[in-house]
Amino acid sequence: MENGAVIRRRLDLLIRLIDTTTGLAVSSQSVVFKKDGKVLPVRQKGEGNYIFIDIGRENSFMELSAYGYDPQVITLDYETLDPNLPSIDVFLIPSENTPQVRSLTGKVRGLTSVEAVQLGKPVCSISEFEPKDNRMTLFLPNKRMNMEDGHYGLLHEEKGYEHFVVKEQRSPVSVILTEPLAEEFAVNSPIAQVVFGHVDEKGNYTLRVLDTAEHPKYLVRFTTADGDRYKVYDFGSDPPVEVKN
């Protein structure tokens, strides 16, 4: 009997691409991933999922370009990823010439991240939270909406919000969070989708949102080493203007 060779291949990375303005997966044949200047072979599996086989698990940087979106550099730090299934969510920002988007740009010294939630247009509101199993019960959810793996903000009026991630959706009115809520909340406080922006090493930032005729106000969170700072912007004008209390 001849000995047969066993060929084993390893999944080294799963990247999920998400349009930050809509929260929807980005599936496109035009997505290109590069490492050390070389195009990486990639397999597309399901909506927005891109799989890399046998590329190695060294910490490095990966360049990403996708038609209609700003290019991005992805930091690969395998010490922070699941060794069984290393995966990263990448939130793509539509390019500035994309129709129906508005841009907020600027510079803040020491800025590490910028994100926002839309005011006046929640996806649902909170009924209660059970810390024992990180279960949140919802009021008035969109029953057709899948919140799983989504990033959301639980608003504290227009003063701030707590960013949380949904691990699992048990039913239209029940979701499990990846982490317990850390802040106090009022019952029926609105929950809105988080929109991510981009910050470079010098503190220059870009945040783009969908240009909608109604509810153009967004609560923007600027994060530095000193903590979070919130500002309300009216994206109904171009460029957006800060709304003073």
Image: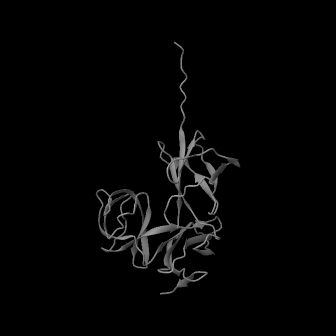
Tell me if residue 55 comes above or below residue 64 in the rendering.
above
Q: x, y percentage for residue 183?
A: 37, 69
- Outermost residue on the top side: it is 1
> Which residue is nearer to you in this view: 41 or 134?
41
Residue sitting at 50 percent across and 46 percent down? 86
The reply, left or right, for residue 149 in relation to residue 56 is left
Task: Name the colouring of the figure.
Answer: one colour
Q: x, y percentage for residue 135?
A: 31, 60
> Which residue is nearer to you in this view: 81 or 42?
42
Q: x, y percentage for residue 51?
A: 55, 46
Snapshot quadrant of residue 104: bottom right
Snapshot quadrant of residue 103: bottom right
The reply, left or right, for residue 160 in relation to residue 58 is left
Tell me if residue 86 comes above or below residue 95 in the rendering.
above
- Outermost residue on the right side: it is 37
Q: How many marks?
A: 0
Q: x, y percentage for residue 60?
A: 62, 49
Residue sitting at 53 percent across and 82 percent down? 234
